[in-house]
Image (tube, rainbow, N blue to C red):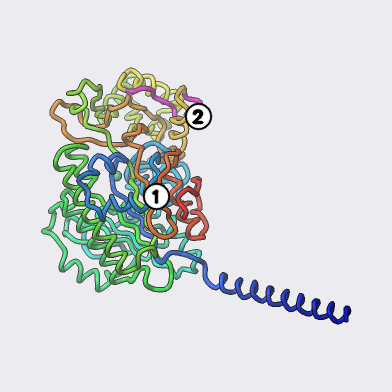
Amino acid sequence: MQSCGLNIYNIMRRLLIIIAMLCVYAGSIQAGTKVDRPKLVVGLMVDQMRWDYLYYYYSDYEEGGLKRLLAEGFSCENTMIPYIPTITAIGHTSVYTGSTPALHGICGNDFFIDGKAVYCCGDSTVRSVGSNSKKGQMSPRNMIATTIGDELKIATNWKSKVIGVALKDRAAILPAGHSADAAYWWDTTVGHYITSTYYMDKLPKWVEEFNKENHTAPNFDIRDTDQGVTMTFKMAEAVLDNEHLGQRGETDMLAVSVSSTDIIGHRVGTRGPENKSVYLQLDRDIAKFLKKLDDQVGKGNYLLFLTADHGAAHNYNYLNEHKIPGGGLESWKHVKTLNQHLSEKHPGAGDLILGSHSLRYYLNYENIEKAGLDPQKVKQEAIAWLKKDRRFLQVIDFEQAATAPLPKTIRERICNGYHYGRSGDIYAIARSQYTDTEDSPTYKGTTHGNWNPYDSHIPAVFFGWHVKHGSTSRPTYMIDIAPTVCELLHTEMPSSCIGNAIEDIVE
Ligand SMILES: [Zn+2]
């Protein structure tokens, strides 16, 4: 009896083990059929959106727009830009590559590559699609890193669709990446959306139809109006409708950037009724866009992030009225006077400075070589001359930036922003609240580009799929956004990513 009981016990035990193994096996099949990903990723960049605009206009925002993102999403309250200069093309590239100019190669809107002037997206090998102007001679070829969208496409064997939309070409092209299906931007000369032969030879029928219904008179700059915000979201919604993003059984990506906030901000500064008006328009359009995503893709089925490419300084005249120091730098005038100074030292050598962008000065190596001069000597002469201007805190030799007598965080940002052969040779760091704008008691506008918090502290709000509600005040960086999104998507990070995933946001 005893041995029989043992046998039954053994049989039962084996049966239970087999059942348990079958359950595990079945479970693994179920879990392994498809990687858990959102239906759609939406990147929403607001050009020139200072972090404090989330709160400065808070009481005027609707419930369904920016307030909803904060109320339901996760806000990284201390997100900084970890490089200088803080400029549009660089910001858009750095968010989507998780990298900095040192590695992704986009060093400004305009810069020089080995002495040749380039526009960040300029590409003479392609032509406009949708107009006969040169506004479509654009591609992402100067960018030498992959983006979130490129990695998503690689991970899904190119089944994902990735599309970029913005009024500014660079704000549509760089976020969409190299392998994008399309990027659409606004050609002001014709008053509608265009693209380039980099992506396609002909506009899709639906874009032609969209342009028929949504256009302006030629040369009217809609980008400098509140309607520019609405025209951006209208196109984003048309992409959702016609390309069925997030509704195809594969994870897609839509990169949207709002350009009008920057163009208006440059003209009127960070305060006043016009700035307020464009942010309230943005808020209303975001509310409508979120509702569209809820209806079309489903609440919780999409992952969205909101951020900015840079902030902006307050207008110095506005600050001066309240005894806060500040002023304009007019750096474009330096190149001429610096060249005059150097030509007195080296008569007949021609211009020894090629140009400047965002307080970075480029040596003219061709003329330096022709005149048989030592570039290091010319560089030191130029630095000594620039240092006489006390609106600069410091003027440094880029190649010596790592040992410059500056706080570590600024040295790091200079190195992160320096790309050999593209960034120039000398960098000037301005005193706080000194903007590279005209210097006049009637100047009303603003700009950006420096390391200071007003230019480098940006919103970073995650919302939707697997994002919990909350916020963190621990330091995070613009370049952390890409690895965070890639971790949620279970895709590899972009090829030159040096950021870290922000694990706090995950539900
Ligand atoms: Zn910008």
Assign ligand 1 to one image quadrant: top left
Element class at badge 1:
strand
Around disc 1, counting alpha carbons within 10 Å, would you say few (fewer than 14), some (14 to 19), or many (20 or more)? many
Q: Residue at x 50, y 55 (%)?
A: 487
Residue labelled with disc 1: 74
Based on the displayed image, in which of its 4 quarters is residue 80 positioned? top left
Image vertical order of residue 259 relative to residue 16, above or below? above
Q: Residue at x 42, y 51 (%)?
A: 143
Total marks shown come to 2
Taking depth in this image into account, of 470 and 498 the one nearest to the observer is 470
- Is residue 401 covered in magenta? yes
Taking depth in this image into account, of 296 and 160 the one nearest to the observer is 296
Q: Is residue 318 left or right of residue 403?
A: left
Identify the mark nearer the N-term, 1 or 2.
Answer: 1
Taking depth in this image into account, of 375 and 171 the one nearest to the observer is 171
The disc at residue 204 is none
Front label number (1 vs 2): 1
Q: Is residue 69 left or right of residue 14?
A: left
Residue 272 visible in the displayed image: yes
| Image: magenta residue range | 392-404
* Percent x, y of residue 164: 33, 59
Q: Residue furthest left?
A: 217
* Percent x, y of residue 1: 88, 82
Residue 347 visible in the displayed image: no
* Percent x, y of residue 124: 32, 56
Based on the displayed image, in which of its 4 quarters is residue 4 positioned? bottom right
Based on the displayed image, in which of its 4 quarters is residue 385 positioned? top left
Element class at badge 2:
helix
The disc at residue 402 is 2
Image vertical order of residue 481 relative to residue 21, above or below? above
Taking depth in this image into account, of 139 and 407 the one nearest to the observer is 407
